[in-house]
Image (cartoon, helix red, strand yellow):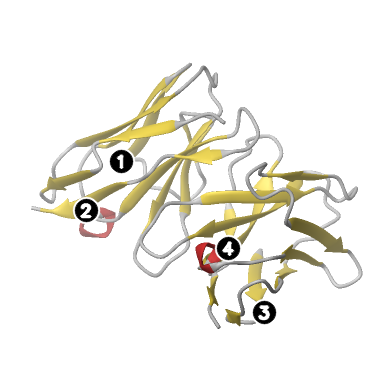
Amino acid sequence: QVQLQESGPGLVKPSETLSLTCTVSGASVTNGGYYWSWIRQPPGKGLEYIGYIYFTGSTNYNPSLKSRVTISLDASKNQFSLKLNSVTAADTAMYFCARDPRISGAPSTWGQGTLVTVSA
Amino acid sequence: DIQMTQSPSSLSASIGDRVTITCRASQSISSFLSWYQQRPGEAPKLLIYSASTLQSGIPSRFSGSGSGTDFSLTISSLYPEDFATYFCQQSHSSPRTFGQGTKLEIK
């Protein structure tokens, strides 16, 4: 079955860059039927779409984060990645990667999530 | 951005009850609406997409309806495992946005 797993540092200092990777198993990131998404959830709060990438390299970012976000895809490793620069405490959140069918726009397979804390 | 407003924000109910959660979009989103369930410490789980299509493996006691700006999620008879937080999400326009969540608690 399809599984997604986030990895990366759990603690990032303010003003630095948050970097996370999502490793996909049971499916290929080059499958044209899906977008590959990043979504975050601050502790005790709601969900926020960060953005997504298509296998062609085309991306779509939330305008609220667009100036700080880069999502990339590595087909050779079957992974996609998130970089968020100039982080502040407001970026502390659980970060989820997800597989998002193009036909519905509804992420149907999620990673378990990884908590990233921004603190000195 | 399209704003998604859920009501109620919290709801107390008993096992076996029928409950309905509503979600209103700030502009028409056709049927580009999904519902998720999230239990504490877990990732969200997709229940319904395209407003009314049940995701594979989801029990038939869950159903969705609506189009345009007004949508609802109904659980026909609550099971213990249904007590969780529910979110709606629109995929009509970028950025995709979520409702603030409805916490369903045991009465």
**Viewer-nearest residue: A102 or A119:** A119
Relative image position of residue A70 (x, y in whole percent) = 78, 57
Q: Residue tagged by mark 3? A: A8
Q: Residue tagged by mark 1? A: B61
Q: Is residue B57 left or right of residue B7?
A: right
Q: Residue tagged by mark 4? A: A96
Chain for disc number 1: B
Chain for disc number 3: A
Confirm or deny contact between disc 3 and disc 2 (CB under 8 A).
no
Q: Which of marks 1 and 2 is nearer the N terminus?
A: 1
Determine if marks 4 and 1 fall on one subunit.
Answer: no
Confirm or deny contact between disc 4 and disc 2 (CB under 8 A).
no
Chain for disc number 4: A
Marks 4/1: CA distance?
27 Å
Q: Is residue A45 left or right of residue A110?
A: left
Relative image position of residue A114 (x, y in whole percent) = 55, 73
Marks 3/4: CA distance?
12 Å
**Viewer-nearest residue: A13 or A72:** A13
In this rendering, which labeled residue sits more in front, label 1 or label 3?
3
Q: Identity of the amino acid at label 3?
A: Gly
Q: Is residue A60 left or right of residue A93?
A: right
What kind of element bears circle 2?
A: loop
Determine if marks 1 and 2 fall on one subunit.
Answer: yes
The circle on residue B53 is none
